[in-house]
C-alpha cells in the first residue's frame, strides 16, 4: 500500500487573507492527501520546522502580500540547510508572471496563479513529489 501524500499548506508573511489557502487545502484533502494547515502569518522558519516535524512530501505556500520573492526562496534555503531539500515546494497566489522565472530559479518547483484549476495543482503534486 502506498503512503498517503502529506502536504503542508502555509501562509508566509504578514498576509491576512487565507481563503485561497483553505480552498487548496480542502481540494488536496478531497483528493486523498493528508493536509496540515499552519494558519496565517508564518515565518519561513516556522514553515520549515512544521514541514520537518510533520514529515511532509510537499510545502504549498499561498501568498498575496507581494513578499513572494523574499519569503518563498527563504523557505527553500532553510529546507536545504535542514537537509530536507527532497520536500517539493510550490507556491500560489497573486504573483506577477515576470517574477515566476526568478522563483523557479530559486527552487520553487511551480507557481499556481489565480484561476488555476485545483486539479492542475493536485496532479502536479502527485507527479512531482519524491517518494520516500
Image (cartoon, grey):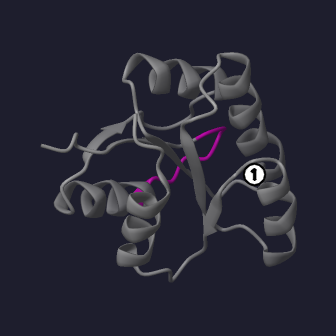
Q: Residue 92 or 125: which is nearer the viewer?
A: 125
Residue 91 in percent (x, y) is at 60, 56
Q: What is the tally of numbered marks visible in this picture?
A: 1
What residue is drawn where x is 55% and y is 28%? 47
What residue is drawn where x is 78% and y is 48%? 67
**Residue indicated by mark 1:** 68
Residue 100 in percent (x, y) is at 79, 67
Magenta span contains residue 17:
yes
Q: Is residue 64 left or right of residue 34?
A: right
Q: Residues within 10 Å of mark 1 (few under 14, many from 20)?
A: many
Point out the image quarter for the C terminus: top left
Q: Is residue 98 left or right of residue 118?
A: right
Q: Residue 38 or 73: which is nearer the viewer?
A: 73
Residue 109 in percent (x, y) is at 65, 56
Point out the image quarter for the N terminus: top left
Most common SS among magenta residues: loop
Q: Which residues are magenta?
A: 12-19
Magenta span contains residue 124:
no
**Residue 127 against residue 60 in the figure, above or below:** below
Image quarter of residue 29: bottom left
Residue found farthest to the left: 1
What residue is drawn where x is 51% and y is 83%? 115
What residue is drawn where x is 64% and y is 65%? 111
Q: Is residue 5 left or right of residue 32?
A: right
**Which element carries disc 1, helix, strand or loop?**
helix
Q: Residue 90 or 20: which is nearer the viewer?
A: 90
**Residue 95 against residue 5 in the figure, above or below:** below
Amino acid at each position: 500500500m502506498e503512503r498517503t501524500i502529506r502536504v503542508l499548506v502555509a501562509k508566509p508573511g504578514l498576509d491576512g487573507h487565507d481563503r485561497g489557502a483553505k480552498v487548496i487545502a480542502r481540494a488536496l484533502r478531497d483528493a486523498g492527501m493528508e493536509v496540515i494547515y499552519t494558519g496565517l502569518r508564518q515565518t519561513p522558519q516556522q514553515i520549515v520546522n512544521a514541514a520537518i516535524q510533520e514529515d511532509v512530501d510537499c510545502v504549498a505556500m499561498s501568498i498575496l502580500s507581494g513578499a513572494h520573492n523574499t519569503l518563498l526562496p527563504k523557505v527553500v534555503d532553510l529546507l536545504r540547510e535542514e537537509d530536507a531539500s527532497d520536500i517539493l515546494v510550490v507556491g500560489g497566489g497573486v504573483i506577477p508572471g515576470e517574477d515566476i522565472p526568478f522563483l523557479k530559479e530559486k527552487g520553487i518547483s511551480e507557481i499556481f496563479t489565480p484561476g488555476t484549476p485545483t486539479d492542475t495543482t493536485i496532479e502536479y503534486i502527485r507527479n512531482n513529489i519524491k517518494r520516500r
